[in-house]
Every structure is written in C-alpha cells, then in structure tokens.
Amino acid sequence: MRTTEDADRASESLLRPTTTSSSRARRGGGGALVVLFGAGAALAAAFGARDGDNVAAALAFDKSAPTTTTGDSHVNIRDEWGPGPLHEVHWDAKTGFHYDAHDGSSFEKFEEKLGARMIQSTVMKYYPTRLKSDQPSFSVYYTVEDYPKTKCWKSARTGLAPEGCHTDQWPRVYNFASQPKDASLLPALDQVTLITIAEPLVDMLEHEGEDAKLEPPNWPKQQVFGMKGENATAWENLIPKIAWQGTDYRFYGPEFDGFKEDSCHHPNDCVLNQIWQRAGGGHGKANYTLAMRETLARNDITPRLRLVLNSLLDDSWIDAKFFCVARYDSRFPLRVKLGKELRVEADRKMTGDDLAKYRYHIDLGGAGGTTWTGTIHKMSLPGVLFHHETAMRDSYFDSIKPWVHYIPVAEDLRDLRQKFDWAQANPQKCKQISAAASAWVKAFNTRRALLRHNYNTLAVNLAKTIDPSKKHLVPFEKAHPSAMLGRIRQRILNGLRRAARARAAAQ
C-alpha cells in the first residue's frame, strides 16, 4: 500500500511547483505562496492534451484577466473566511493552472496538493473546451481539512451567522471533507469527492484508457476487507462483541454546537486525570468503577471516550480502546501515563484481520463528525456495522441506507445497548445487512463507480463556478464509454476499415 511520501514522489512528474514572492502583496499577507502547475508542454504531455489551447505555459499569477466566479463580487471571501485554510485553484489561458499553498504539516500539504490535482484533472477531463484560449479565467475555492474551518458557520440552534459573515453572497466553496447535513449552515458549500479516495481517482483521470481495468483501485492507507481474497469468517464463529479501536480525538470542531474536547486536551483540562483523582490517584484501593460511572453521567465527553469507558466497565459486549497517542508525547507525559494506568490504551493496534473476527463494529466520528472512509472499511468486514449518526456527512452517505447497509446509533450512544440486544436477537437480519454492506463496498470500489461518484459530486458541481451556462460539460458516458460500448465501437471501426480496404482492392 502506498504511503503519503510515495504518492508525493509519484506526483512530481505532474506537479513541479514554483513559488513567487509577490503573492503576499496580492493576498494581503498570510504567507501564502503561489504554486504553479508545470510548464505547458510537460503538463500537456502528462494529461495527454491534444490541443495547445488546453494548457498554456505556466508563467505568473495574473488575475487582471476576466474571472468567472459566483456570488457577489463586493464580498471578499478570504477576508470573511477566518483563520482556517481556504485553498484556491486558478486558471487562465496565459498561465494555465496554479494554486495557493499554505504552511502546514507534510500531510496537510499533500492533501492540499491532492485537492488541487483533483480539480485540475476533473476540469481537463470533463471541460476541455472551457480551457481554450478565448475562455475567461476562473478561480475555484476548496477545502481539504477535517471540515471547513471557517468562522462563518451559522448556529444550528439560532440559524444565525457571526457578524461580518455574508455567506449567502460567497462564491462556491468545494469541500473534499466532512460537512453538516444541514446545508443552510453554510449555503456556499458544495460537498465533493472525499479526499481519502481522491488519489486513485487522480490516477484514473490522468491516465487515459486505464478506467476499464478490472482490478479494484488501491486506496492509500485504507484497508478494504475482502478485496484481495480474504475469507469471511462464518457469522456463528464471530466474537459477539462490538469492536472499536482508534485515536483519542475531539468530537466536532469548536465552531459547532455539540463540540467536545478529547479526554486529555490539556493538563488542566483532562477528563482522564479527573477520573484518576476521583478514584484515589494511586493512593490506596482505587474505586475506578465509581469514578467512571460518574464520568459517563456527564454530557461533555466524546462518544469515543464514552465507548471506551463502557468497555472497561463491562467487556462482555464491548471491546474498545484508544490507540496511537504519540502526538501527546511532545506536549505532556500525563496523557500517556493515564492511558496506561486507566487501561484505556491498547498495547498494540488491531489489524483488519483482528477486527474481522468480531460480529459488530462501530465507526465513531472525530473532529469532522465522521470517520471518512473508515465507515467503508467497517462495512466491508464480515460483521455488521453500528453506524454513528451525527450531524455531519461524507460525500458517499446518500448511497448507504439505515437498516439496509448498517444499524444506526444515536450521536451520544444512548441507544447502543438497545441496538446491540436487538442485533443479538436478530442474527438473520444482521447477516442480510452485513451482506448488503459488503456488496455495496465491492460495487463502489470499482474504477467506473468511483469515476461516476466524482463526476456527480465534483464535475457537475464545478459548473456553478466555471460553466454557469452548462455549455462545456462532457457527458459521463462520452468521457468514459463502457467496455461493451468500446468493443462495439472497435468492431464497427474494424468493419469500416475492412470495407475500405476491399473497395481499394477492387479499384
């Protein structure tokens, strides 16, 4: 399975970024850099462009040409967005494609570049005539973080946006991550292809003729059980417990109602330390059970901590622990110590094969309120998924249904025990749900299905920004003729060639 570093190196043949020092003046500070997308000839070769109009030489970031956007031109989205990163891909006939780069970790920079490549590859595949030399320039805003980190979210309780936020007048923002199910909280937002399935899609879009391959795409750092011939364990032999293991991470972002910090956000704000102190702090016989029950009565702990504490109190139906808290080591040792003392940390990471031995699974949301493709991974396992129903959604959620592909559970897990007891009493129904979920994963994890998903979510929505008149979008079937249609077309061409040769011979 490819790592982030491997993917970054592989993309260098396509993206050879160049920076300019003048971007600060154009952006009004903030340290943003303009990264250019390769020289025209190299980029045309990389994308198989047949027309010089499709890709121009990358020179300077010049926005003096007419620009296609949506929204009120008097509203500056960058001024209103807030401290979170808002990325931008720009195109004009003179300079081609380029994007603004932000400071951040190597992983954040990789995802930012991947989002830019997704937009560029999608536009070049489905809007080729929009890139001709007589076309106006355009800018596309996008986000790739856990959720769009803007200060301008409307409150779900009041329906009001913070002062100074004119979100109804913003241009479209294309979100490659999680977002609220309530679209009114940020009307300018369009949810597009989830960033964790973007890398194989970029490969498909950038390499013509490979979308007909039969092997399933390889999702970097994402396991999909059964795609490589793993044998599903018989339902009767699966361990009848809910299995979960994951990071101790906050729930939602601070911009949202229902935000909850992780179990030990700070030495002075550490739920685990409060449990430790209530239980005696290592002095005498600690009453951990009472301290944990008191903590479970609170409404300010994350669903992940709630599940782990329930597992410690009664492991007859839940096997749940945190794993991977290395990020705390450099901040303070208290979290690491408490994780071991309270037994909330696992000694080792569970593999896909380990998880596949359990009858029940749960996908608990993190900062974005979901687990991204973690839901797909758990739907692929032999057991059945208890899906964490939160206020957030991912790009593929419309195609999975409660009681068909998963068993829904409440955001605060108040009905988890009830749903578990129901599942234990209804094994045949659970088998049907599990089988339907696995079938959905196998169907979704194909080249054509992923391309169709990206077309419906990203390509079609991009028209709002770059093609309001809808004159340039290439139909999906024309861009990706099916294998059968391709064979029929080839037979027709072969027949025409034979007829032409016969006529030539007769003359």
Image (cartoon, grey):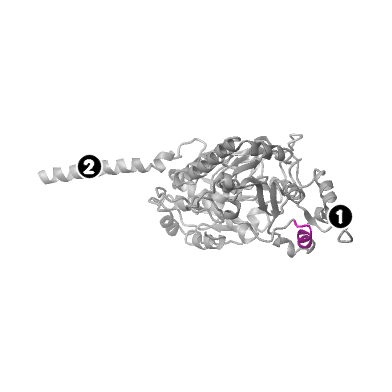
Q: Nearer the viewer, residue 352 or 212?
A: 352
Q: State whether residue 79 is above or below residue 106.
A: above
For the residue carrying disc 2, how many other residues have a C-alpha within 10 Å: few (<14), some (14-19), or many (20+)? few
Q: Is residue 342 magenta?
A: yes
| Mark earlier in primary sequence (1, 2) | 1
Residue at the location (22% across, 42% down)? 495
Which numbered marker is on residue 259? Answer: none
Q: Position of residue 111 (x, y in %)?
A: 59, 55
For the residue carrying disc 1, how many other residues have a C-alpha within 10 Å: few (<14), some (14-19), or many (20+)? some
Q: State whether residue 55 is above or below residue 415.
A: below
Residue to which mark 2 is pinned? 495
Residue at the location (54% across, 61% down)? 8
Type of amino acid at the residue the image marks with label 2: Gly
Type of amino acid at the residue the image marks with label 1: Ala
Residue at the location (40% across, 53% down)? 48
Q: Nearer the viewer, residue 142 or 345?
A: 345
265 on left or right of 398: right
Q: Position of residue 315 (x, y in %)?
A: 72, 49
Residue to which mark 1 is pinned? 279
Q: Which residues are magenta?
A: 335-343
Looking at the image, do the residues carrying marks 1 and 2 touch, with CB atoms under 8 Å apart?
Answer: no
**CA distance for labels 1 and 2:** 83 Å
Q: Nearer the viewer, residue 188 or 325?
A: 325
Looking at this rendering, what residue extends furthest in the left direction? 507
Circle 2 sits in a helix, a strand or a loop, which is it?
A: helix
| Residue 365 appears anywhere in the view | yes
| Residue 92 appears anywhere in the view | no
Looking at this rendering, what residue extends furthest in the front direction? 236
Q: Position of residue 350 (x, y in %)?
A: 63, 56
